[in-house]
Amino acid sequence: MSLTANIDLKDLVRTVPDYPKPGIMFRDITTLLGHANGFQACIEQLVRPFRNQRIESVAGIEARGFILGGAVADRLHCRFIPIRKKGKLPGKAVGQDYELEYGIDVIEIHEDALNAGEPVLLVDDLIATGGTAEAAVKLLRKLHAEVVGAAFVIDLPDLGGSARLAKLGVECHTLMTFEGD
Ligand code: AMP
């Protein structure tokens, strides 16, 4: 039997109450990434629905989306494209703003990162309100890429992010849910 068959990935996620501020239940995946068989099982499960789909690139959202997205890209034999916080990319970049609880933030992608019509899979660790993922989808579409889906380890469905992405025409593949926020 494979070493990853009986692993309950949810057991490997650590919940840190009141981080980074009171009232937030932070779902920490470093404990999952730090478990060799757990990490392997997580990547296997993230790629499963996409194995036979035409995907040329994986776009990962800074920073945990880089760790997961890099491994997913390797498994799918495609390339990796970073989506970063404003001002971090060295080349000419295209930006997209999105609302935070207080104020706005901006994510960016290199303007020459993708070809028009290129099928791309979006990857991040967690979807909550979906604000970050929605901005990422808009950014990929600004470069005329075709977003074939989005994969997250964790969904917080009460915050509505996966439903928000569905409204944009992007289906979310998630490995586990936590109730509440
Ligand atoms: P959102 O834009 O609201 O969907 O938030 C998603 C981003 O914020 C992801 O990059 C997550 O890593 C991070 N995030 C939001 N809420 C949490 C949480 N409860 N635990 C861990 N990370 C979170």
Image (spheres, rainbow, N blue to C red):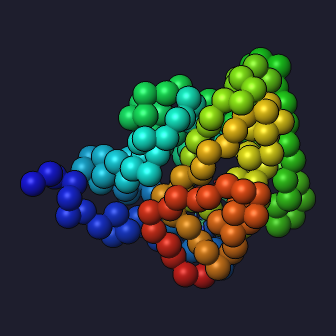
Q: Residue at x 87, y 47 (%)?
A: 97
Which part of the image, by quadrant, shows the N terminus?
Answer: bottom left
Residue lying farthest left?
A: 1
Decide if residue 40 is in sight here.
yes
Identify the image quadrant of residue 25: bottom right
Q: Which quadrant of the frame does ligand 1 lie within?
A: bottom right
Q: Is residue 161 left or right of residue 106?
A: left
Q: Count the numbered circles shown.
A: 0
Q: Residue at x 86, y 59 (%)?
A: 99
As drawn, 125 above or below 94: below
Identify the image quadrant of residue 38: bottom left
Give x and y (percent) for residue 172: 59, 59
Give x and y (percent) for residue 60: 60, 40
Return the residue nearer the eye: 179 or 17.
Answer: 179
Q: Residue at x 42, y 46 (%)?
A: 47
As drawn, 63 above or below 143: below
Q: Residue at x 67, y 43 (%)?
A: 147
Return the residue nearer the eye: 26 or 116.
Answer: 116
Decide if residue 88 is in sight here.
no
As drawn, 67 above or below 114: below
Identify the image quadrant of residue 145: top right
Give x and y (percent) for residue 142: 83, 36
Which part of the image, by quadrant, shows the C terminus?
Answer: bottom right
Give x and y (percent) for residue 56: 56, 29
As drawn, 126 above or below 69: below
